[in-house]
């Protein structure tokens, strides 16, 4: 469903004060370098790598927040750059993104009802009753129950987990086919993390959404991802089913990531065999 081929994004690095440093002018940051993968309907692909490896840039390229330097992104066979320029609103019905900071992503002046219903208004839905019914339905689906008790609240009246649920509700209200979740639980308390992770997994499965789950740590991937793509310095160095990558990583970099998993909860991830864990040290 999502087909990414040879995706590349280069930035002219010499912006700001750094450009004044000798040798900086004209340098290029190769944020994403020849990345290819595909994601099927209902499937969650984990994009994992350390900070600065190009994960967010990849996510932004996929949802059209950035334009590729080269390469193609196809959604159901259609080139996404073409689809986006042809009909922006139709593109946004298909593709949505969830960010790391749910507070920063929500306008504090608006109520939950307004925030979640806004995409429908933007799509031209004028029937107030229809919007209200959809808002209530997605709020219930993301676990904000009863929906009525959340509709008139403002973001600051919610917990971090509830705010991320609002962001998720807003992202699914248009019934997208593809969702990019960029570090969606990195800022949440451990106690809430797993609920949100399981919610994302359930949404992908039940709604048949293709999902790119971006994270810098491997702790949560076992609970949400079907496959993993390990990213290092703009490139994908390893891909495979979650279990296979975690239990028998073929790449040295993947092994160092596995060694860095803080939680060794066997329900969450496969702990690497001792030989591999040693090799990674
Ligand atoms: P990650 O999400 O894996 O931490 P990013 O995709 O944010 O990595 O960044 C990858 C690289 O691209 C980094 O070196 C970053 O500094 C650079 N980069 C990201 N966005 C921009 C931009 N808008 N302009 C210049 N460089 C950027
Ligand atoms: Mg990032």
Image (cartoon, rainbow, N blue to C red):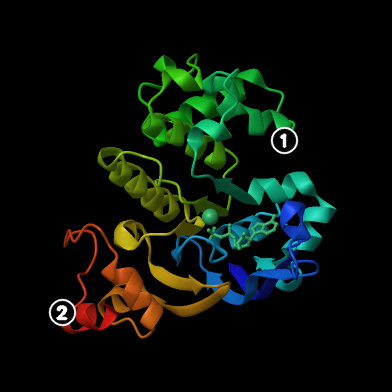
Q: Which mark is residue 133?
A: none
Residue 45's place in the image compared with 232, above or below, is above
Q: Is mark 2 within 8 Å of ligand 1?
A: no
Q: CA distance from mark 1 to mark 2?
A: 53 Å
Q: Residue at x 41, y 70 (%)?
A: 228
Nearest the viewer among 51 and 190 is 51
Q: Residue at x 32, y 56 (%)?
A: 220
Residue 62 at least partly seen:
yes
Q: Which mark is residue 123?
A: 1
Residue 77 at least partly seen:
no
> In which quadrant will I find the C terminus?
bottom left
Label 2: which residue?
274
Q: Position of residue 249 (x, y in %)?
A: 33, 81
Q: Residues within 10 Å of mark 1 (few under 14, many from 20)?
A: few
Query: Do the residues under discs 1 and 2 have CB atoms within 8 angstroms?
Result: no
Q: Position of residue 111 (x, y in %)?
A: 55, 18
Q: Name the residue at the front extreme.
A: 22
* Residue 186 in the figure: left or right of residue 98: left
Tell me the SS state at disc 1. Answer: loop
Q: Residue at x 23, y 59 (%)?
A: 268
Sequence-first tag of 1 and 2: 1
> In which quadrant will I find the N terminus?
bottom right
* Residue 194 in the figure: left or right of residue 213: left
Q: Position of residue 263 (x, y in %)?
A: 22, 57
* Residue 204 in the figure: left or right of residue 108: left
Nearest the viewer among 40 and 246 is 246
Q: Name which quarter of the figure residue 131 lies in.
A: top right
Q: Residues within 10 Å of mark 2 (few under 14, many from 20)?
A: few
Tell me the SS state at disc 2. Answer: helix
Q: Name which quarter of the figure residue 274 lies in.
A: bottom left
Front of the two marks 1 and 2 = 2
């Amino acid at each position: 469903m999502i087909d990414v081929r040879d995706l590349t994004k280069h930035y002219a690095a010499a912006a700001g004060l750094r450009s004044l440093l000798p040798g900086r002018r004209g340098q290029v940051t190769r944020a994403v370098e020849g990345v290819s993968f595909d994601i099927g309907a209902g499937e969650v692909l984990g994009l994992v790598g350390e900070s600065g490896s190009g994960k967010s840039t990849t996510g932004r390229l996929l949802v059209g927040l950035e334009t590729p330097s080269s390469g193609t992104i196809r959604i159901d066979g259609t080139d996404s750059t073409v689809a986006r320029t042809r009909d922006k609103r139709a593109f946004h019905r298909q593709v949505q993104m969830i960010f790391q900071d749910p507070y920063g992503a929500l306008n504090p002046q608006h109520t939950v009802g307004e925030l979640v219903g806004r995409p429908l208004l933007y799509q031209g839905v004028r029937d107030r009753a229809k919007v209200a019914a959809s808002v209530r339905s997605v709020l219930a689906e993301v676990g904000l129950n009863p929906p009525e008790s959340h509709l008139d609240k403002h973001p600051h009246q919610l917990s971090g987990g509830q705010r991320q649920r609002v962001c998720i509700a807003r992202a699914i209200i248009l019934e997208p086919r593809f969702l990019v979740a960029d570090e969606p639980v990195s800022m949440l308390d451990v106690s809430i993390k797993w609920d949100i992770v399981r919610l994302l997994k359930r949404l992908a499965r039940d709604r048949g959404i293709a999902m790119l789950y971006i994270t810098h740590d491997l702790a949560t991937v076992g609970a949400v991802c079907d496959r993993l793509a390990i990213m290092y310095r703009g490139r994908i160095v390893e891909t495979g089913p979650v279990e296979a990558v975690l239990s028998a990583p073929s790449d040295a970099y993947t092994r160092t990531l596995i060694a860095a998993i803080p939680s060794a909860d066997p329900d969450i991830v496969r702990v690497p065999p001792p030989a591999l864990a040693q090799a990674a040290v």
